[in-house]
Image (cartoon, grey):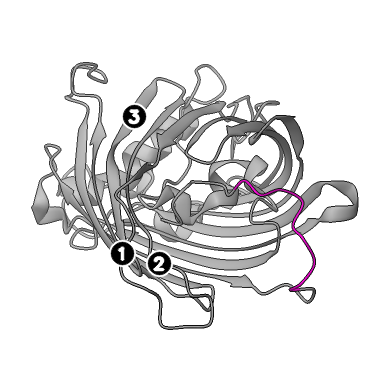
Amino acid sequence: MLRSLLPLVFFIALSLAPISRVFAQDPQYSQYYAAPLYLNPAFAGAELMGRVGFNYRNQWPSIEAQFTTFSAYYDTYLPEYNSGIGVHVMQDSEGASKLRSTSVSAMYSYELRLGDKLYFRPGFQASYIRREIGFYENLVFANQIDPLDPTGPLLPGATIPGLGDPVGLFSLSAGGLLFTNNAWLGFTAHHLNQPNQSFVDGLSPLPRKLSLHAGYRISLGQGSMRRDFTHMSKQRYLTPTINYKRQGPFEQLDLGAYFYVEPILLGLWYRGLPYKPVETQSNRDAIVVMVGVNLLSGLSIGYSFDYTVSQLGIQSGGAHELSLSWTIPSLNQGKPLGRDTILPCPKF
């Protein structure tokens, strides 16, 4: 019965939009570094070559109110302008009400050298977001519930012209990335202009999303020799990372580490802020485990699973996430790169 009432509750929240703020959260990825352009527009062109990637997430697949997200991106570097450009496309379906969001984003970044092996990349993003909910297909209205039989068949509802039509939003975002060979610190502010997302008359601003992400790569020495023409040793390192997010009244922290023994990468981290509850509810989300492979061809593949530790529990099915990216080899292999510092962020 609770699940059947979720769409009604959602509609009530929408109806209150003219007199109160309705908070929403952007989709999230556990493999946030495998979705670099979604995390921070400053990552556009950061590999100093072309890159294409795909991400898929299915959260809580065992219940009706599941969330599914798919995204694709492409970015490249323009050495003559010290600039990176990129495009990101994402589609997201949320909960039992099937709120659907489709976004198309364009990114630009510029690379500044601040010192010996110290760089800063400011980035900017412009996005068009289309949101639709299918009012009369997915929502239940109060006049469709028989007071004499509230759990019985729904009554016919009246269609109101214009109510619940899809809405289009234009969002502006910005970020920055400071990095050396072994450390990085990034900051992003999405939806700076807080566009109106209401499906009904009134104002419901999309809250700004703030993100602070950082990490440090610790070398674990050299491995065995690669079996290729490079005559180099395989890499081995441990990379602790954090990713703090805040949007409206919601806050979250991803805290964990990546362990890389070329070509295998393993990840383990915790997501939540248990000391800071949200409306009396404990802010515990999930323990995330990940496995991936980085091939010398430039292909990277990752899979992660979120073990839900919130009150929803593992009976929700947790969350499954897949990532795929390919770094496109440069057409000028012999040409020197614009810097000898390698961005230390993991690919997952």
Q: Which residue is mark 2?
A: 233
* Residues marked 2 and 1 touching at CB (< 8 Å): yes
Query: Residue at the spot x=71%, y=48% of the render?
Result: 339
Q: Which residue is mark 1?
A: 223
Near mark 1 (Cα within 10 A), the count class, few <14, some 14-19 or many ≥20, is few
Amino acid type at mark 3 = Gln
Mark closest to the chain's N terminus, 3 or 2 = 2
Near mark 3 (Cα within 10 A), the count class, few <14, some 14-19 or many ≥20, is some
Residue 334 magenta-highlighted: yes
Task: State the separation of the CA atoms marked 3 and 1.
Answer: 36 Å
**Residue 139: percent from left, percent from top:** 40, 51
Amino acid type at mark 2 = Ser
Q: Quadrant of the C terminus?
A: bottom left
The furthest residue to the front: 231
Residue 344's disc is none
The furthest residue to the right: 80
Task: State the separation of the CA atoms marked 2 and 1.
Answer: 6 Å
Query: Residue at the spot x=44%, y=52% of the render?
Result: 346
**Vertical position of residue 245 compared to residue 10: above or below:** above
Q: Which residue is mark 3?
A: 252
Give the main secondary structure, helix, strand or loop, of the magenta stretch: loop
Near mark 2 (Cα within 10 A), the count class, few <14, some 14-19 or many ≥20, is some
Query: Residue at the spot x=28%, y=43% of the render?
Result: 257
Give the magenta part as a residue range. Answer: 333-341
Answer yes or no: is residue 268 visible. yes
Viewer-side residue, 161 vs 201? 201
Marks counted in the figure total 3
**Residue 101: percent from left, percent from top:** 55, 53
Amino acid type at mark 1 = Gly
Q: Secondary structure at mark 3?
A: strand
Q: Is residue 228 left or right of residue 78?
A: left
